[in-house]
Image (tube, rainbow, N blue to C red):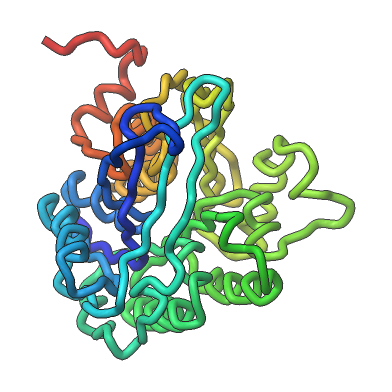
Amino acid sequence: MAKIVTLGEIMLRLSPPGYERFLQASSFDVQYGGAEANVAASLTQLGHHTTFLSKIPNNSIGDAAIGTLQKLGVDCSHIARGGDRLGIYFLENGASIRPSSVIYDRKDSAITKAAPEEFDFDSIFQDADLFHVSGITPVLSPQTASVTMEALKSAKKHGVKISFDLNYRTKLWTEDIEGKQKLLREIMEYADICFGNARDAAKCLGYHEDGIDFINGEYSICVDETHMKHVVNKYHLKYLITTLRNSISASDNGWSAAVCDGTSLYKGKNYNLHIVDRVGGGDSFASGFLHGILSNMGMEKSLEFAIAAAAIKHTIPGDINYIYESEVLTLMESDGSGRVQR
């Protein structure tokens, strides 16, 4: 199978048990996760060799975060150790009409102090097939921007395909919007595969077309064939992939996706989901599509695999999709009824 490298932050996740609110909680459940770490974990379980890059404190909490990935088989040998703290986020799981809520406590986390020289990129990208990073990582700090750019340059030098998830996070875009958009536009020059759509591109890259408000206008325009093609061609992408979520409530969603290669747009199967935990769903989707492409499934089957993999993730607590390829393929061929397997 393929050799994949991801770069990002893994955080400590603290959640009140079940659907309790922060105000009533007397304890927190502990999980670890982060966009690129989640992708590495999923791809390892799907049979690939994955390497996760980050900077993590050299203490017991850092060890626990790394251990979460190591037990799944992710190569953590290139992680830089140091810094004062692991980033934390608090998640209050929503239900019915009450949405989930996230509070971040990640300022000055270890990865925000990382430096390019802490990573031997030439060795890391030797014989690698794909490098995946998200728009979250480079906007955390000037240091993470520098690390991300050096990783991209090294990956491209070694002929490695680049996967980039725009992954817009409102709470990370409260200042220097134009500077961050410029940075992400530079990153897009390296990208072969991009997860996002015209709205994500407008927010993260400053993308625009005359007379169209992609940010405040109708969402359907952002994901239609015409404008998905325009984004593909603007940034010279091989694939642009977007999720299509219909939020009926915090507990129930319609779930599908679409992929565009600049020539055509394919929309996949729709699933009706009753949600246990939606955090990490997009990362599971990204890893599912990458698995399909790296396994030569073709564009359409890769999308169907991604949709099904992420649908399963919505039933699993925590950030990480604990998954088998066989169950994803079974779901793709089933009616999604969830009948007991005997």
Is residue 221 something one can see in this rendering?
yes
Q: Is residue 205 left or right of residue 68?
A: right
Q: In this orientation, which residue lies closer to the viewer: 296 or 205?
A: 205
The number of numbered badges drawn on the structure is 0
Residue at image position (54%, 43%) is 242
> Where the C terminus falls, by quadrant?
top left
In this rendering, the answer to whether 259 lies above or below 173 is above
Question: Residue at coordinates 38% horizontally, 71% vertically from top-left?
Answer: 109
Left or right of 118 on screen, residue 87: right
Q: Who's the residue at 27% across and 55% down the image?
A: 40
Location of residue 130 in the rendering, given as x and y in whole percent from the top left corner: 32, 64
Q: Nearer the viewer, residue 138 or 193?
A: 138
Q: Residue furthest right?
A: 211
Tell which of 28 and 266 is nearer to you. Answer: 28
On the question of residue 298 being in view, the answer is no
Residue drawn at 44 percent across, 44 percent down: 282
Horizontal and vertical percent for residue 193? Answer: 47, 58
Q: Position of residue 73 (x, y in %)?
A: 12, 55
Give the image location of residue 325, x and y in percent: 21, 36
> Image quadrant for the N terminus?
bottom left
Asked if residue 341 is positioned above or below residue 227 in the image, the reply reads above
Q: Is residue 140 left or right of residue 236?
A: left
Residue that lies at the very extreme toward the bottom in this rendered image: 117
Q: Is residue 318 above or below residue 169?
A: above
